[in-house]
Image: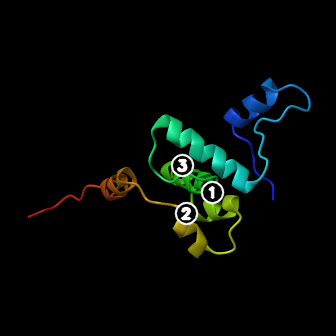
Amino acid sequence: MSIELNMNAQHQLLTKKDNEFIFYLPSTNGVNKVLKNWAIKAGIEKYLAFHCARHKFGTLLASCETVIYTISNLLGHSSLLHTTKYVRVSEELKKRAVNSIPKLDYKV
C-alpha cells in the first residue's frame, strides 16, 4: 500500500537527521504503556492506545469530507463495513449535511 504524505509528515521527515527515528516504537504493548503514562501525566482519564490513531485518522478524513471509499482504502480495509466502525460522524458533519440541502422555492 502506498499513502501520500501530507505537508506535516513531510516536514517531520525533512527536519530529522540521517538514521534518526521520528518515533521510537519498541512494540505495540510498549507504545500503549508510554501512551498510558503520557495520559496520566496530562490528567487524561480516557483510555488511550496506539490503535486510537487509526480512528482519529479516519475521523479527520471524514471531517474533511473525504469520500468513504477513499478513507477505506487509506485505512487498508477490505470492506466498507470495517471503515464505518472507524469513522465517527461528528455533530458538525451532520449539521453540514442537513444544511447542504438547497433552499426550495415554494409557490402558493
Q: Earlier in the sequence, mark 1 or mark 3?
A: 1
The residue wearing badge 2 is: 86
Which numbered disc, 2 or 3, marks the residue that appears first in the sequence?
Answer: 3
The amino acid sitting under disc 1 is: His
- Name the residue furthest right: 19
Q: Where is residue 96 in the image (x, y as percent from the top left)?
A: 36, 52
State the residue position of label 3. Answer: 60
Q: How many marks?
A: 3
Whether the residues at callouts 2 and 1 have beta carbons within 8 Å, the answer is no
The span from disc 1 to disc 3 (Cα, nearest Å) is: 15 Å
Q: In this view, does 74 lie to the left or right of 40?
A: right
Q: Could you tell me which residue is drawn at 58 percent across and 42 percent down?
A: 37
Q: Which is more N-terminal, label 1 or label 2?
A: 1
Residue 105 vs residue 18: left or right?
left
Q: Which of 92 and 34 is in front in this view?
A: 34
Nearer the observer, 103 or 58: 58
Residue flagged by tag 2: what amino acid is it? Tyr
Q: How far is mark 2 from mark 3, CA to CA?
A: 11 Å
Name the residue tied to disc 1.
51
